[in-house]
Image (cartoon, grey):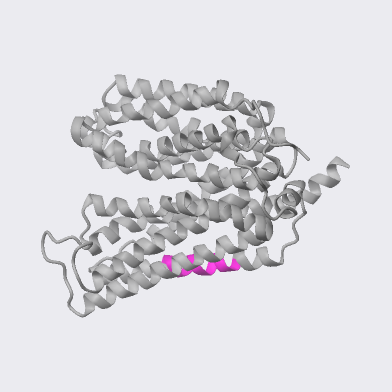
Amino acid sequence: MGNSKSQQYLRPLILMVTLFFMFGMATNINNVLVPYIKDVYQLSNFAATLVTFSFFMGFLVISPLGSFIVSRFGYKNTAVIGLVTMSGGFLLALASSKLALSALESGEVLSAGVSVLTAGGLLRVSYLVFLLATFGVGSGVTILQVAANPYLTALGNPETADSRINTAGFFNSLSGSIAPLVAGMILLGSFGSTSDALRAISLPYMGLIGFTLVVAVVFSFAKLPRLSIERDVTETSKPSGNPLKYKHMWMGVVAIFMYVAAEVSIPTLMVELIRESKMGWSWFSFENAATYGSMYWALVMLGRLAGIFIMQKVQIHKGLIFTSGPALLLVALGMTTTNDLSVLAFVLVGLFNSVMWGAIFPLGIARMGKLTNKASGYMLMGVVGGAIYPLLQGLVADSWGVHASYGIILLPYLFLLYYGLVGHKVKSAPAQV
Protein backbone atom coordinates (compact mmCIF):
# COMPACT_ATOMS: atom_id res chain seq x y z
CA MET A 1 0.00 0.00 0.00
CA GLY A 2 2.80 2.38 0.92
CA ASN A 3 4.68 1.63 -2.31
CA SER A 4 1.48 2.19 -4.31
CA LYS A 5 0.99 5.60 -2.76
CA SER A 6 4.65 6.48 -3.34
CA GLN A 7 4.25 5.61 -7.03
CA GLN A 8 1.09 7.70 -7.18
CA TYR A 9 2.96 10.68 -5.75
CA LEU A 10 6.06 10.31 -7.95
CA ARG A 11 4.67 12.10 -11.02
CA PRO A 12 3.26 15.09 -9.13
CA LEU A 13 6.53 15.32 -7.19
CA ILE A 14 8.47 15.52 -10.47
CA LEU A 15 6.10 18.22 -11.74
CA MET A 16 6.44 20.23 -8.53
CA VAL A 17 10.23 19.94 -8.74
CA THR A 18 9.97 21.30 -12.28
CA LEU A 19 8.20 24.35 -10.88
CA PHE A 20 11.01 24.93 -8.41
CA PHE A 21 13.46 24.64 -11.30
CA MET A 22 11.52 27.46 -12.95
CA PHE A 23 11.70 29.56 -9.76
CA GLY A 24 15.48 29.40 -9.76
CA MET A 25 15.75 30.23 -13.42
CA ALA A 26 13.43 33.25 -13.20
CA THR A 27 15.01 34.56 -10.00
CA ASN A 28 18.64 34.34 -11.10
CA ILE A 29 18.55 35.32 -14.78
CA ASN A 30 18.71 39.03 -13.87
CA ASN A 31 22.02 38.47 -12.09
CA VAL A 32 23.58 38.17 -15.55
CA LEU A 33 21.41 40.64 -17.44
CA VAL A 34 21.22 43.54 -14.98
CA PRO A 35 24.87 44.69 -15.38
CA TYR A 36 24.28 45.11 -19.11
CA ILE A 37 20.90 46.72 -18.56
CA LYS A 38 22.57 49.12 -16.13
CA ASP A 39 24.97 50.10 -18.89
CA VAL A 40 22.19 50.52 -21.47
CA TYR A 41 20.17 52.86 -19.25
CA GLN A 42 23.15 54.52 -17.49
CA LEU A 43 21.59 53.61 -14.16
CA SER A 44 22.68 54.86 -10.79
CA ASN A 45 23.09 52.25 -8.05
CA PHE A 46 19.71 53.24 -6.62
CA ALA A 47 17.95 52.89 -9.97
CA ALA A 48 19.63 49.53 -10.51
CA THR A 49 18.35 48.20 -7.16
CA LEU A 50 14.81 48.93 -8.36
CA VAL A 51 15.12 45.86 -10.60
CA THR A 52 15.53 43.53 -7.60
CA PHE A 53 13.01 45.55 -5.63
CA SER A 54 10.38 45.21 -8.40
CA PHE A 55 10.88 41.45 -8.55
CA PHE A 56 10.47 40.86 -4.82
CA MET A 57 7.57 43.31 -4.52
CA GLY A 58 5.61 40.77 -6.56
CA PHE A 59 5.66 38.52 -3.49
CA LEU A 60 4.25 41.24 -1.25
CA VAL A 61 1.53 42.45 -3.60
CA ILE A 62 0.43 39.24 -5.34
CA SER A 63 0.61 36.66 -2.53
CA PRO A 64 -2.98 37.30 -1.29
CA LEU A 65 -4.21 37.07 -4.90
CA GLY A 66 -2.33 33.78 -5.28
CA SER A 67 -4.20 32.41 -2.28
CA PHE A 68 -7.53 33.38 -3.85
CA ILE A 69 -6.56 31.73 -7.15
CA VAL A 70 -5.74 28.47 -5.35
CA SER A 71 -9.11 28.56 -3.57
CA ARG A 72 -10.93 29.27 -6.82
CA PHE A 73 -9.10 27.08 -9.32
CA GLY A 74 -7.07 24.50 -7.38
CA TYR A 75 -3.35 23.83 -7.29
CA LYS A 76 -2.78 22.54 -10.82
CA ASN A 77 -4.63 25.38 -12.55
CA THR A 78 -2.91 27.89 -10.28
CA ALA A 79 0.46 26.54 -11.45
CA VAL A 80 -0.62 27.07 -15.08
CA ILE A 81 -1.75 30.64 -14.30
CA GLY A 82 1.58 31.34 -12.60
CA LEU A 83 3.56 29.99 -15.56
CA VAL A 84 1.57 32.07 -18.04
CA THR A 85 2.08 35.15 -15.84
CA MET A 86 5.84 34.52 -15.81
CA SER A 87 5.81 34.12 -19.58
CA GLY A 88 4.00 37.46 -19.86
CA GLY A 89 6.70 39.08 -17.72
CA PHE A 90 9.44 37.69 -19.95
CA LEU A 91 7.51 38.93 -23.00
CA LEU A 92 7.38 42.44 -21.52
CA ALA A 93 11.14 42.27 -20.86
CA LEU A 94 11.68 41.33 -24.49
CA ALA A 95 9.49 44.25 -25.58
CA SER A 96 11.50 46.53 -23.30
CA SER A 97 14.77 45.55 -25.00
CA LYS A 98 13.19 46.18 -28.42
CA LEU A 99 11.99 49.63 -27.33
CA ALA A 100 15.46 50.51 -26.00
CA LEU A 101 17.04 49.30 -29.24
CA SER A 102 14.66 51.46 -31.29
CA ALA A 103 15.50 54.47 -29.09
CA LEU A 104 19.25 54.00 -29.55
CA GLU A 105 18.98 53.39 -33.28
CA SER A 106 16.99 56.62 -33.63
CA GLY A 107 19.83 58.51 -31.96
CA GLU A 108 18.29 58.98 -28.51
CA VAL A 109 20.88 59.32 -25.73
CA LEU A 110 20.80 60.28 -22.07
CA SER A 111 22.55 63.48 -21.07
CA ALA A 112 25.38 63.12 -18.57
CA GLY A 113 24.07 63.03 -15.02
CA VAL A 114 20.44 62.64 -16.10
CA SER A 115 18.56 59.68 -14.60
CA VAL A 116 16.55 57.52 -16.96
CA LEU A 117 13.74 57.76 -14.39
CA THR A 118 13.34 61.51 -14.94
CA ALA A 119 14.38 61.80 -18.58
CA GLY A 120 11.79 61.87 -21.34
CA GLY A 121 11.74 59.79 -24.48
CA LEU A 122 11.58 56.12 -25.41
CA LEU A 123 14.47 55.04 -23.18
CA ARG A 124 12.54 56.05 -20.07
CA VAL A 125 9.45 54.20 -21.30
CA SER A 126 11.60 51.17 -22.03
CA TYR A 127 13.07 51.11 -18.53
CA LEU A 128 9.65 51.49 -16.89
CA VAL A 129 8.38 48.62 -19.03
CA PHE A 130 11.37 46.56 -17.88
CA LEU A 131 10.53 47.25 -14.21
CA LEU A 132 6.94 46.22 -14.91
CA ALA A 133 8.26 43.08 -16.61
CA THR A 134 10.39 42.24 -13.58
CA PHE A 135 7.37 42.73 -11.33
CA GLY A 136 5.38 40.45 -13.66
CA VAL A 137 7.98 37.68 -13.45
CA GLY A 138 8.09 38.01 -9.67
CA SER A 139 4.30 37.87 -9.56
CA GLY A 140 4.28 34.68 -11.63
CA VAL A 141 6.86 33.10 -9.34
CA THR A 142 4.74 34.15 -6.35
CA ILE A 143 1.60 32.49 -7.74
CA LEU A 144 3.59 29.33 -8.42
CA GLN A 145 5.06 29.32 -4.92
CA VAL A 146 1.64 29.76 -3.31
CA ALA A 147 0.56 26.58 -5.09
CA ALA A 148 3.74 24.52 -5.00
CA ASN A 149 4.88 24.85 -1.38
CA PRO A 150 1.71 23.68 0.40
CA TYR A 151 1.11 21.00 -2.25
CA LEU A 152 4.62 19.64 -1.74
CA THR A 153 4.11 19.74 2.01
CA ALA A 154 0.92 17.65 1.69
CA LEU A 155 2.35 15.23 -0.90
CA GLY A 156 3.24 12.54 1.62
CA ASN A 157 4.15 12.23 5.29
CA PRO A 158 4.13 15.69 7.00
CA GLU A 159 7.24 14.65 8.97
CA THR A 160 9.26 14.43 5.73
CA ALA A 161 7.82 17.59 4.13
CA ASP A 162 11.09 19.46 4.58
CA SER A 163 12.93 16.68 2.73
CA ARG A 164 10.58 17.02 -0.26
CA ILE A 165 10.97 20.80 -0.25
CA ASN A 166 14.75 20.39 -0.06
CA THR A 167 14.60 18.05 -3.07
CA ALA A 168 12.77 20.75 -4.99
CA GLY A 169 15.11 23.36 -3.51
CA PHE A 170 18.12 21.50 -4.86
CA PHE A 171 16.76 21.77 -8.39
CA ASN A 172 15.88 25.39 -7.69
CA SER A 173 19.54 26.04 -6.85
CA LEU A 174 20.68 23.97 -9.81
CA SER A 175 18.67 26.06 -12.25
CA GLY A 176 19.84 29.17 -10.43
CA SER A 177 23.39 28.14 -11.28
CA ILE A 178 22.67 26.97 -14.82
CA ALA A 179 20.56 29.93 -15.98
CA PRO A 180 23.26 32.60 -15.44
CA LEU A 181 25.87 30.29 -16.98
CA VAL A 182 23.81 29.66 -20.13
CA ALA A 183 22.84 33.32 -20.41
CA GLY A 184 26.48 34.30 -19.95
CA MET A 185 27.55 31.96 -22.76
CA ILE A 186 24.93 33.52 -25.04
CA LEU A 187 25.91 37.05 -24.12
CA LEU A 188 29.69 36.58 -24.01
CA GLY A 189 31.44 38.52 -26.71
CA SER A 190 28.21 40.12 -27.96
CA PHE A 191 28.84 43.57 -26.63
CA GLY A 192 30.75 45.48 -29.25
CA SER A 193 28.14 48.20 -28.75
CA THR A 194 25.09 48.89 -26.62
CA SER A 195 22.89 47.92 -29.58
CA ASP A 196 24.65 44.56 -29.78
CA ALA A 197 23.99 44.10 -26.07
CA LEU A 198 20.27 44.68 -26.50
CA ARG A 199 20.06 42.27 -29.41
CA ALA A 200 21.89 39.59 -27.42
CA ILE A 201 19.72 40.18 -24.33
CA SER A 202 16.66 39.27 -26.42
CA LEU A 203 17.84 35.67 -26.86
CA PRO A 204 17.61 34.51 -23.20
CA TYR A 205 14.16 36.07 -22.87
CA MET A 206 12.91 34.36 -26.02
CA GLY A 207 14.15 31.04 -24.66
CA LEU A 208 12.49 31.65 -21.28
CA ILE A 209 9.16 32.53 -22.92
CA GLY A 210 9.19 29.29 -24.91
CA PHE A 211 10.31 27.08 -22.02
CA THR A 212 7.73 28.55 -19.63
CA LEU A 213 4.86 28.05 -22.07
CA VAL A 214 5.91 24.45 -22.76
CA VAL A 215 5.85 23.69 -19.00
CA ALA A 216 2.44 25.41 -18.76
CA VAL A 217 1.06 23.13 -21.50
CA VAL A 218 2.47 20.05 -19.74
CA PHE A 219 0.78 21.08 -16.50
CA SER A 220 -2.51 21.72 -18.29
CA PHE A 221 -2.71 18.07 -19.37
CA ALA A 222 -1.11 16.53 -16.28
CA LYS A 223 -3.22 14.41 -13.95
CA LEU A 224 -2.41 15.27 -10.35
CA PRO A 225 -3.88 13.40 -7.36
CA ARG A 226 -6.53 15.33 -5.47
CA LEU A 227 -5.07 15.65 -1.98
CA SER A 228 -7.00 16.36 1.19
CA ILE A 229 -5.43 19.80 1.33
CA GLU A 230 -6.94 20.59 -2.08
CA ARG A 231 -10.38 19.46 -0.96
CA ASP A 232 -10.01 21.75 2.03
CA VAL A 233 -9.32 24.84 -0.05
CA THR A 234 -11.67 24.26 -3.00
CA GLU A 235 -14.80 22.79 -1.42
CA THR A 236 -15.35 25.90 0.66
CA SER A 237 -15.52 29.00 -1.48
CA LYS A 238 -14.50 31.40 1.24
CA PRO A 239 -12.73 29.76 4.17
CA SER A 240 -13.37 31.97 7.18
CA GLY A 241 -10.69 33.03 9.59
CA ASN A 242 -7.42 34.89 9.59
CA PRO A 243 -4.25 32.75 9.70
CA LEU A 244 -2.31 35.65 11.20
CA LYS A 245 -4.12 35.31 14.52
CA TYR A 246 -2.16 32.11 15.13
CA LYS A 247 1.23 32.87 16.65
CA HIS A 248 3.26 30.12 14.97
CA MET A 249 1.88 31.26 11.61
CA TRP A 250 2.59 35.00 11.79
CA MET A 251 5.97 34.27 13.29
CA GLY A 252 6.55 31.97 10.31
CA VAL A 253 5.97 34.97 8.03
CA VAL A 254 8.60 36.90 9.98
CA ALA A 255 10.92 33.88 9.79
CA ILE A 256 10.60 33.76 5.99
CA PHE A 257 11.30 37.52 5.88
CA MET A 258 14.42 37.08 8.00
CA TYR A 259 15.65 34.02 6.11
CA VAL A 260 15.33 35.56 2.64
CA ALA A 261 16.74 38.86 3.93
CA ALA A 262 19.89 37.11 5.16
CA GLU A 263 20.25 34.76 2.18
CA VAL A 264 20.07 37.60 -0.35
CA SER A 265 22.07 40.15 1.66
CA ILE A 266 25.15 38.02 2.30
CA PRO A 267 26.32 37.73 -1.34
CA THR A 268 25.04 41.15 -2.42
CA LEU A 269 28.01 43.16 -1.13
CA MET A 270 30.58 40.37 -1.15
CA VAL A 271 32.59 41.83 -4.02
CA GLU A 272 32.78 45.18 -2.24
CA LEU A 273 33.75 43.43 0.99
CA ILE A 274 36.68 41.79 -0.77
CA ARG A 275 37.72 45.12 -2.25
CA GLU A 276 37.51 46.79 1.17
CA SER A 277 39.23 43.92 3.01
CA LYS A 278 42.26 43.82 0.66
CA MET A 279 42.63 40.06 0.49
CA GLY A 280 45.99 38.68 1.42
CA TRP A 281 46.01 35.26 -0.24
CA SER A 282 46.59 35.16 -3.97
CA TRP A 283 43.52 33.02 -4.66
CA PHE A 284 41.32 35.15 -2.39
CA SER A 285 41.87 38.29 -4.43
CA PHE A 286 39.63 40.95 -5.87
CA GLU A 287 40.27 39.50 -9.33
CA ASN A 288 38.61 36.29 -8.12
CA ALA A 289 35.83 38.09 -6.28
CA ALA A 290 33.06 36.75 -8.50
CA THR A 291 34.08 33.24 -7.45
CA TYR A 292 32.86 33.91 -3.93
CA GLY A 293 29.29 34.44 -5.07
CA SER A 294 29.46 31.22 -7.07
CA MET A 295 30.89 29.36 -4.07
CA TYR A 296 28.12 30.70 -1.85
CA TRP A 297 25.32 29.48 -4.14
CA ALA A 298 27.15 26.21 -4.83
CA LEU A 299 27.16 25.53 -1.09
CA VAL A 300 23.43 26.31 -0.97
CA MET A 301 22.89 23.73 -3.71
CA LEU A 302 25.09 21.09 -2.04
CA GLY A 303 23.42 21.69 1.31
CA ARG A 304 20.00 21.11 -0.22
CA LEU A 305 21.22 17.91 -1.82
CA ALA A 306 22.46 16.67 1.56
CA GLY A 307 19.26 17.90 3.20
CA ILE A 308 17.16 15.58 1.03
CA PHE A 309 18.56 12.66 3.04
CA ILE A 310 19.57 14.19 6.36
CA MET A 311 16.34 16.07 7.05
CA GLN A 312 14.30 12.86 6.76
CA LYS A 313 15.93 11.75 10.00
CA VAL A 314 15.65 15.06 11.86
CA GLN A 315 12.56 16.75 13.26
CA ILE A 316 11.76 19.85 11.23
CA HIS A 317 12.20 22.38 14.04
CA LYS A 318 15.49 20.77 15.07
CA GLY A 319 16.70 21.10 11.49
CA LEU A 320 16.12 24.84 11.76
CA ILE A 321 17.99 24.97 15.08
CA PHE A 322 20.94 22.97 13.73
CA THR A 323 21.30 25.35 10.76
CA SER A 324 20.48 28.78 12.18
CA GLY A 325 22.81 28.28 15.15
CA PRO A 326 25.96 27.60 13.08
CA ALA A 327 24.95 30.34 10.61
CA LEU A 328 24.76 32.81 13.50
CA LEU A 329 28.21 31.76 14.71
CA LEU A 330 29.70 32.10 11.21
CA VAL A 331 28.30 35.61 10.78
CA ALA A 332 29.70 36.52 14.21
CA LEU A 333 33.07 35.05 13.15
CA GLY A 334 32.97 37.08 9.94
CA MET A 335 32.22 40.20 11.95
CA THR A 336 35.06 39.71 14.42
CA THR A 337 37.74 38.78 11.87
CA THR A 338 39.10 40.48 8.80
CA ASN A 339 40.45 39.72 5.34
CA ASP A 340 40.26 36.15 4.04
CA LEU A 341 38.80 34.48 7.12
CA SER A 342 35.98 37.03 7.31
CA VAL A 343 34.87 36.50 3.71
CA LEU A 344 35.27 32.72 3.95
CA ALA A 345 33.01 32.68 7.03
CA PHE A 346 30.27 34.53 5.15
CA VAL A 347 30.61 32.19 2.17
CA LEU A 348 30.18 29.13 4.40
CA VAL A 349 26.85 30.48 5.67
CA GLY A 350 25.40 29.38 2.32
CA LEU A 351 25.72 25.75 3.40
CA PHE A 352 23.44 26.33 6.39
CA ASN A 353 21.01 28.61 4.58
CA SER A 354 20.33 25.78 2.16
CA VAL A 355 17.65 23.88 4.11
CA MET A 356 16.05 26.69 6.10
CA TRP A 357 13.19 27.37 3.69
CA GLY A 358 12.25 23.69 3.76
CA ALA A 359 12.03 23.85 7.55
CA ILE A 360 10.32 27.23 7.99
CA PHE A 361 7.49 26.78 5.48
CA PRO A 362 6.02 23.54 6.91
CA LEU A 363 6.32 24.93 10.45
CA GLY A 364 4.49 28.13 9.48
CA ILE A 365 1.51 26.43 7.82
CA ALA A 366 1.28 23.55 10.30
CA ARG A 367 -2.30 22.57 11.21
CA MET A 368 -3.83 25.43 9.20
CA GLY A 369 -6.43 23.12 7.63
CA LYS A 370 -8.80 25.10 5.39
CA LEU A 371 -6.69 28.20 5.96
CA THR A 372 -3.59 26.55 4.46
CA ASN A 373 -3.77 28.45 1.17
CA LYS A 374 -4.25 31.77 2.95
CA ALA A 375 -1.38 30.95 5.28
CA SER A 376 0.80 30.02 2.31
CA GLY A 377 0.07 33.36 0.68
CA TYR A 378 1.01 35.24 3.83
CA MET A 379 4.18 33.19 4.21
CA LEU A 380 5.29 34.18 0.72
CA MET A 381 4.73 37.85 1.49
CA GLY A 382 7.70 37.47 3.81
CA VAL A 383 9.96 37.02 0.77
CA VAL A 384 9.88 40.82 0.45
CA GLY A 385 12.76 40.69 2.95
CA GLY A 386 14.95 40.07 -0.10
CA ALA A 387 14.01 43.52 -1.39
CA ILE A 388 14.17 45.48 1.85
CA TYR A 389 17.14 44.10 3.78
CA PRO A 390 19.83 44.59 1.10
CA LEU A 391 18.78 48.25 0.89
CA LEU A 392 19.22 48.57 4.67
CA GLN A 393 22.60 46.88 4.44
CA GLY A 394 23.61 49.31 1.69
CA LEU A 395 22.69 52.28 3.90
CA VAL A 396 24.79 50.88 6.75
CA ALA A 397 27.68 50.17 4.36
CA ASP A 398 27.63 53.76 3.10
CA SER A 399 27.81 55.08 6.67
CA TRP A 400 30.07 52.63 8.51
CA GLY A 401 31.69 50.44 5.86
CA VAL A 402 30.87 47.18 4.14
CA HIS A 403 32.37 44.95 6.84
CA ALA A 404 30.29 46.63 9.53
CA SER A 405 27.13 46.30 7.41
CA TYR A 406 27.18 42.53 7.87
CA GLY A 407 26.38 43.12 11.53
CA ILE A 408 22.69 43.63 10.74
CA ILE A 409 22.57 40.02 9.45
CA LEU A 410 23.02 38.76 13.02
CA LEU A 411 19.39 39.72 13.75
CA PRO A 412 17.79 37.37 11.18
CA TYR A 413 19.69 34.35 12.47
CA LEU A 414 18.90 35.20 16.07
CA PHE A 415 15.21 35.25 15.19
CA LEU A 416 15.43 32.02 13.19
CA LEU A 417 17.12 30.29 16.12
CA TYR A 418 14.31 31.51 18.40
CA TYR A 419 11.66 30.31 15.92
CA GLY A 420 13.24 26.85 15.81
CA LEU A 421 13.46 26.66 19.60
CA VAL A 422 10.17 28.22 20.68
CA GLY A 423 8.31 30.31 18.09
CA HIS A 424 7.20 27.39 15.88
CA LYS A 425 5.17 25.70 18.61
CA VAL A 426 1.46 25.51 17.79
CA LYS A 427 -0.43 27.05 20.70
CA SER A 428 -3.75 27.09 18.83
CA ALA A 429 -4.97 26.26 15.32
CA PRO A 430 -8.17 26.36 13.22
CA ALA A 431 -10.67 23.61 13.86
CA GLN A 432 -9.66 20.51 11.92
CA VAL A 433 -12.58 18.97 10.02
The image quarter containing residue 321 is top right
The image quarter containing residue 100 is bottom left
Asked whether 311 or 197 is in front, the reply is: 311
- Looking at this view, name the residue that lies furthest to the right: 1
Residue at the image position 62 percent from the left and 59 percent from the top: 78
Q: Position of residue 282 (x, y in %)?
A: 26, 32
Left or right side of 356 for 278: left
Residue at the image position 68 percent from the left and 27 percent from the top: 313
Q: Position of residue 139 (x, y in %)?
A: 48, 57
Asked whether 396 or 376 is in front, the reply is: 376
Asked if residue 175 lies in the magenta stretch, the reply is: no
Query: Which quadrant would the N terminus be assigned to in this image?
Result: top right
Left or right side of 343 for 163: right
- Looking at this view, name the residue that lies furthest to the left: 112
Query: Which quadrant would the C terminus be assigned to in this image?
Result: top right
Q: Position of residue 248 (x, y in %)?
A: 58, 30
Q: Position of residue 199 (x, y in %)?
A: 33, 72
Left or right side of 188 for 312: right
Badge count: 0
**Residue 190 seen from this side:** no
62, above or below 198, in the image:
above
Please, what is the dominant secondary structure of the magenta stretch? Answer: helix
Asked whether 265 or 228 is in front, the reply is: 228
Q: Which residues are magenta?
A: 204-214
- Looking at this view, name the residue that lies furthest to the front: 240
Residue at the image position 67 percent from the left and 61 percent from the top: 73
Asked if residue 211 lies in the magenta stretch, the reply is: yes
25, above or below 287, in the image:
below
Residue at the image position 31 percent from the left and 74 percent from the top: 99
Left or right side of 390 for 220: right
290, above or below 103, in the image:
above
